[in-house]
Amino acid sequence: MPKPLFCSIGGEDAALSDDEIKSNLFSFLDSLGPREDVLLLPPDYTRFHSQAGKLSRFICEYYNFVSPIDKMEEEGTCTSDEPETKKQKMEAVSNDSSTGDNMKESTTASSAHSPAITILPALGTHAPMTEDQIETMFGKNLVQKEPSPFLVHDWRNDVETIGHAPASMVESATNGMVKDKQWPAQLNKVVWSKRNHDPEQQPHKSVVLSIGQVVPHEVLGMANYNKNLFVGVGGVEAINLSHFIGAVHGMENMMGRSSNPLRSILNYASEHFLQRELDLWYILTVMGTDEETGKVEMKGFYIGNDIQCYNLACDLSLKVNFTMLPRQPKKIIVHLDKDEFHSTWLGNKAIYRTRMAIADEGELIVLAPGVSQFGEDEKIDALIREYGYVGTPATLKSMKESNTLQENLSAVAHLIHGSSEGRFQIKYCPGKLSKEEIEKVGFNYGDLDATMKEYNVQSLKDGWNTISVGGVEEEIYFISNPALGLWAVQKRFDKSNHDDADGSADSVNVSSNQSASTDSGGIGGWKKAP
């Protein structure tokens, strides 16, 4: 069997090649020995940058499940006036790191065994991936495989509760707001079925490989590890309560912190319910961008079956993905990839990834050419339109008065995250929402075409820029891809965001009848239009 920490490679200046990744990955798979079946848990298309699709493909190639993909089929070019999209950037990286004739033998090794392989994307409560998204992320050979190895995670019907974390942990994590409520550890039934063995008498016949990117995260501080299990393939009750815990504990107390009360709850569930039952391994990446070319690169690659693997990835991610600015920008411009961000539910990454950097009374301008809605489904879209991003006190007051909000804790978390609490202004420049719609949820509206003429994203570089707008020189901070980082100044990072909220510890009702929503939220506006 592999060591608990099998692989830990990379660094701040690394750009790991496919050869290096395959060499370590295939050595790990060799060490697992023969298996009857392999279950892969990669993220969905919203985590395209993770390279989990490529890693899943490599695993399938190792086990002779599919033939190696033709690199030429992945080639893409950018002809748009927009910056390269997520898809095009990742394709370019794949082409640049394609294997050569002198590749080491270990990168072409394959197993003598061909186990059954199932791929269960960790959707959380997202919509299922489309065939086009699967092909873009995982390659043509896997999408054309018959029968399809892909399963859809059904958070409503295909989930088992395998245990509970104590109510005392929930109460502590919510600063006393949620009392007498255990946190349910929930898993997709397919994942839980892989435990069927006697660990004292029989070797594991199944292996579960959880694949994904470690990066700062608004709900859990740092993404991945057991989040991929308990949220990615978890149930609605656990997911919604997790998001609510993260929101009321405070974003500045969470973002960029691998150790926090919510992560402790998930770690408790892992230690008590997962580690003995499943042969579960984590394959984690840390992604960054080349400062000169802007291309996405793999900076770190980790394989292990306990928290050490995750902690090492977090250490590197904070060096690669966390930018500590020397001073607070008065104006930040963020561009959202039109292929990736079609709602404020997703696009508000622009705000929560920058809120610890922007100055008081500053302005955040969000260039959102693909945004056409608020929520990811009609129900959540309607809730956002009704309640808006109006600040923590007002949102919690509405929750106490609304059974609908009590049954949609992810939506409550999104609305709490979705407020600047009046500290700074947010101008949203959507491609497909009207001025009236934007202002009614609490944002300032900006015309996309006019604003992009003032702030030409083709000529801006990531970081500080001094430009002329209307004949007036101003300094701005530009971010081309908020999904890959977190920006802060030291005093704001060290400061609890309870200073921005009302600090209330009054208890609130949390319904056990949780409704499904999608994704986790962001930071938005402050006051709704009259």
Image (cartoon, helix red, strand yellow):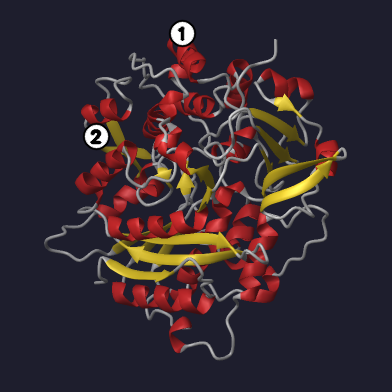
**508 to 119, vertically: above or below:** above
**Residue 448 numbered tag:** none
Residue 218 pos. (x, y %): 47, 39
The residue singled out by tag 1 in the image is 401
Callout 1 environment at 10 Å: few (<14), some (14 to 19), or many (20+)? few
Numbered disc total: 2
The amino acid on which the numbered mark 1 sits, given as a three-letter code, is Glu
At x 64% / y 20%, what residue is drawn? Answer: 385
Q: Position of residue 199 (x, y in %)?
A: 16, 59
**Residue at far bottom of view:** 102
User: Percent x, y for residue 492?
Assistant: 47, 37
Q: Quadrant of residue 249?
A: top left
How far across and down, in percent of the image, does residue 397 sit?
Answer: 46, 11
Check disc 2 and report its element: helix, strand or loop. Answer: strand
Q: Which residue is mark 2?
A: 164
Left or right, 211 with respect to 305, comes to right
- State the residue at coordinates (38%, 63%): 38
Of marks 2 and 1, which one's residue comes earlier in the chain? 2
> Which quadrant of the structure image shows residue 206?
bottom left
Cα distance in 3D space between marks 2 and 1: 28 Å
In the displayed structure, 468 sits above or below 48; it is above
- The quarter of the rendered structure image containing the N terminus is bottom left
Task: Kindly identify the amino acid type of the residue bearing the numbered disc 2.
Answer: His
